[in-house]
Image (cartoon, rainbow, N blue to C red):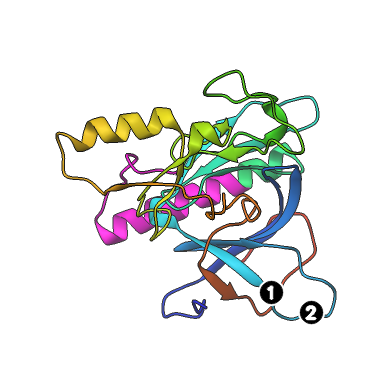
Amino acid sequence: MQPLKVPGRVLVGEGVLTKLCRKRPKPRQFFLFNDILVYGNILISKKKYNQQHIISLEDVKLENVDDEITLRNGWKIISPKKSFVVYAATTTEKTQWMSHIKKCVNDLLLKRGITQDTANDSPVWVPDDEATVCMHCRKYQFSVINRRHHCRKCGKVVCGPCSDQKWLLPQQSSKPIRICLSCYNELSSAKSTNAGPPPAALGAEDSSGEDSSDDDDTNYANVDTVSQDEQFQTYD
């Protein structure tokens, strides 16, 4: 587990946001520090610790999301490791979250004298219910037996035959991960002119990795205290 208590790290704010997960939106507790963003399941009363997921703020970009009928006040949190959509309870809370995250990111980049690179950002996964057929071949009908899979390069929902290749995307995983045929062909073409990681075919025994798609980051940390208040709380 990665410790949260490091010199110079300050808790800026916390609150509950609705994270758009693969199967359905779910409430998640978010903690904004001056250099990292931490999120995870809401803690049960009297339970002191919980596994949390960590994203470095120097890699984070924000992108507004238009309101829908049932989901409002949303925005994308984009990074090389993980990208997803979150929704706040109110417009004011959304504004607070976005402004504080942007300030922390800008201050961190200025302090470290670096600029952001968007070339290797992870995609925001298309939710399962937005695809009844494979988004690659447009023919394969999904069902209880015919499972949905997500391409780790573009985020589209695809069938097994259209995602039977893997590729090493170091920003997301230390092992080759599932990609669709379109992305495989694109990466293979790029590899012919630029040295790149070797492709790998998915064997019959390989898991799609979809079961943990909600929160599949591998960096964890312990948070000592947590508030159940849904409003964004700031700390001076």
- Nearer to me, 28 or 88: 28
Q: Is residue 210 visible?
A: yes
Q: Amino acid at mark 2?
A: Lys
Q: Is residue 168 above or below residue 40?
A: above
Q: Amino acid at mark 1?
A: Asn
Mark 1 and mark 2 in contact? Answer it, CB < 8 Å: yes
Magenta highlight on residue 213? no
- Circle 2 is placed at which residue position? 47
Residue at (64, 37) in percent of width and height: 148
Classify residue 106 as left or right of residue 203.
Answer: left
Residue at (63, 24) in percent of width and height: 140
Residue at (69, 74) in percent of width and height: 50
In the picture, which quadrant includes the C terminus?
bottom right
Residue 208 spot, x, y in % from top left: 57, 49
Magenta highlight on residue 111? yes
Assess disc 2: are there few (<14), some (14-19) or many (≥20) residues with their C-alpha within 10 Å of its C-alpha.
Answer: few
Residue at (53, 60) in percent of width and height: 217
- Circle 1 is placed at which residue position? 50
Tell me the magenta residue range: 97-122
Residue 179 spot, x, y in % from top left: 45, 39
Q: Residue furthest top?
A: 138
Q: Residue furthest right?
A: 45
- Nearer to me, 148 or 125: 148
